[in-house]
């Protein structure tokens, strides 16, 4: 097919054009990772100036109540932000999530990657006589107009052992405020819905 598109170009010109076309096709694929990652701000972004795609990745929280708003703008580096979470470079998973300060986790306890793991670990600890508490911290997500998919999210639980021997699991929950101009999603009472079907987006733990 590419040969037909190139017509009567010379051999060298054809080879160069094939490379350019192949690269263009690859960058259009939704499975291909974004090439660059900007972690200079509170919200990290993956982006590709060639494919004109970008995603919002981790939000690094400083622990202050005044900074529990996650702004997902329309663009970063001049590129539209179309997704929450994604992949960087050669497929490195980079989810949309909240990164908590170190004081929310104890050495050796780690971070649990999903609700099923949290429930399992909590059950084991309680069976061993350890008192457990769940602390849910609400974050407001202001979602830009161009976001149209949640590619990769992470529902993390930080684990901290208290001085009295009990364990506290800290978990982020989200309250969404979606730009009214967004053609894919809308928000209602803090929850995110698909505009076309009215279905709830189940990738997130909601505040209510």
Image: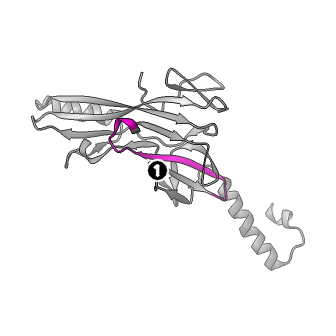
Q: Residue, x 70% and y 58% (percent of image)?
A: 25
Return the x and y of residue 15 as percentages of the image width and height: 76, 74
Q: Is residue 9 left or right of residue 103?
A: right
In the foreground, 85 or 138: 138
Residue under numbered circle 1: 94
* Quarter of the figure with the N terminus: bottom right
Q: Nearer the viewer, residue 45 or 110?
A: 45
Name the side, left or right, on which 162 lies relative to 36.
Answer: left
Question: Measured along the vertical axis of the image, is residue 83 above or below residue 89?
Answer: above
Check residue 57 for magenta coloring.
Answer: yes
Residue 136 occupies which quadrant of the picture? top left
Colouring convention used in this rendered image of the protein: one colour
Judged from the image, the secondary structure of the residue bearing numbered disc 1 is strand
Identified at 22% across, 34% down, the residue is: 168
Residue at image coords 36%, 37%: 114
Q: Is residue 9 magenta?
A: no
Task: Give, as a single range, the part of the protein colored magenta.
Answer: 49-66
Residue 158 percent location from the top left of the image: 28, 40
> Which x, y percent locates residue 162?
15, 37
The residue at 64%/51% (across/down) is 79
In front here: 89 or 8? Answer: 89
Q: Position of residue 58 (x, y in %)?
A: 44, 47
Q: Is residue 95 left or right of residue 150?
A: left
**Label 1: how many Cα within 10 Å (few below 14, some 14–19, many 20+):** many
Check the picture and name the quadrant holding the C terminus.
top left
Image quadrant in which you'd find residue 9: bottom right
């Amino acid at each position: 097919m590419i040969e037909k598109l190139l017509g009567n170009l010379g051999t060298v010109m054809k080879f160069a054009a094939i490379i350019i076309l192949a690269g263009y096709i690859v960058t259009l694929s939704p499975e291909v990772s974004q090439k660059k990652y900007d972690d200079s701000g509170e919200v990290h972004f993956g982006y590709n100036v060639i494919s004109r795609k970008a995603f919002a990745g981790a939000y690094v929280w400083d622990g202050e109540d005044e900074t529990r708003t996650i702004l997902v703008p329309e663009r970063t580096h001049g590129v539209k932000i179309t997704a929450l979470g994604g992949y960087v470079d050669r497929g490195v998973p980079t989810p949309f999530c909240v990164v908590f300060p170190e004081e929310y986790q104890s050495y050796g306890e780690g971070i649990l990657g999903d609700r099923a793991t949290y429930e399992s670990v909590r059950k084991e600890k309680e069976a061993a006589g350890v008192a457990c508490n769940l602390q849910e911290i609400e974050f407001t997500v202001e979602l830009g107009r161009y976001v149209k998919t949640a590619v990769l999210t992470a529902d993390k639980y930080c684990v901290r052992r208290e001085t009295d021997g009990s364990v506290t699991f800290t978990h982020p929950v989200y309250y969404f405020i979606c730009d009214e101009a967004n053609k894919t999603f809308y928000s209602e009472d803090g929850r995110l819905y698909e505009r076309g079907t009215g279905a709830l987006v189940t990738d997130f733990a909601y505040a209510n």
